[in-house]
Image (tube, rainbow, N blue to C red):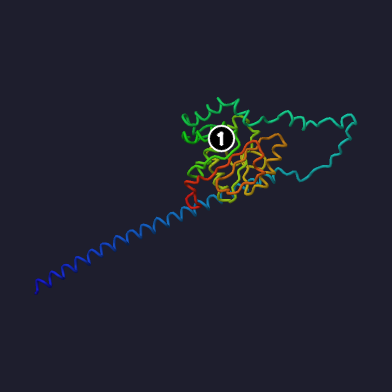
Amino acid sequence: MVRQGLRELEQQRGALQREIDQLERRKAKLEEEMRSSFAGSSQDIAIRVQGFKDYLVGSLQDLATAAEQINLVSSPMIEPPAPVSDMNRPSASETSVDNTVIPLAAQRFAEQRDRIHSLLDQYRTRPDYYGPPWQLRRTFEPIHAERTANWFFTQGGRGAIKSMTSRLQNVLVASAAISCLYALYDRRLCVLVLATTPERLGEWRRWLQDCLGIARADFGTNRGVMLFESAEPMAQRAERLMDSGRLPFLIMDEAESQVSLSLLQYPLWLGFAPDPANPPTDYDYY
């Protein structure tokens, strides 16, 4: 009877030990999940805060620059009446704009096919991480080059391409297109980016600076890169740039589920279409 009782106690002890081991493993798993979830949430919050900070600081600097350029004291100017013979003659500004007609994008890219292909091959095979501003400075993979070339030569510089796996890779593709266009049009090119939250605009600002080697001074109202939270002011700005002989290049973030038709009338625009097979979320799309 004593031996039988000892065997039963040993069996109960073994069962309890197995339950304790199982509970300890479950506890360790829960602790690991708690740590990873907290770290992921903290990282996501930090990224959003940093993006908003970059956007806010850049906007304040743009505002200060614009305020410095305002001429607060202006003297009245009396213009003499124009001669009757000159009433129907176009003005000098109109003549200069007419003399700088922008060719159709598809036609221009067909003429510059070899040059664009050469630039894309250079970005892919011979990256220059310390090159001049507006030249791509980051590692460029074949898939990025393929989508950029397709946008130039198949879509003629006007269309949407399938989004990459992250916003950073989308910015990389857009930066390659900007770099090639800047090589063709130089300072006539103006880049307009649409993303309807300050956090996303902050990311575009930071990553364009990183990919193209440009400074905050290259972000402004009528130069370099302009950032917009809604389509209406973006379209108005593009119209004024066209009237002044500049070439606007409109870029629409992948998170823009609805795009205004007013943006599709301009000669250069690039939109990132979500991939139906791998739709991003606000949590992991960073």
Query: At 67% across and 29% down in the image, what residue appears?
Result: 103
Along the viewing direction, whichever of 57 and 191 lies nearer the viewer: 191
In this view, 116 is above or below 274: above
- Residue 158 position, x and y percent, is 61, 37
Report crowding for label 1: few under 14, some 14 to 19, many 20 or more residues within 10 A (C-alpha): some
- Residue extending furthest toward the front: 276
- Residue extending furthest toward the right: 84
- Residue 208 position, x and y percent, is 55, 40
In this view, 128 is above or below 42: above
- Residue 20 position, x and y percent, is 26, 65
Locate the N terminus by quadrant: bottom left
Lateral position of residue 255 relative to residue 234, left or right = left
Query: At 9% across and 71% down in the image, what residue appears?
Result: 3
Q: Amino acid at mark 1?
A: Trp
Regarding mark 1 in the picture, which secondary structure is present there? helix
Query: At 68% across and 42% down in the image, what residue appears?
Result: 237
Residue at mark 1? 151
Along the viewing direction, whichever of 142 and 241 lies nearer the viewer: 142
Along the viewing direction, whichever of 184 and 134 lies nearer the viewer: 184
**Count of picture labels:** 1
Please identify the quarter of the rendering in which residue 99 is found. top right
Lateral position of residue 119 relative to residue 83, left or right = left
Along the viewing direction, whichever of 30 and 138 lies nearer the viewer: 30
- Residue extending furthest toward the bottom: 1
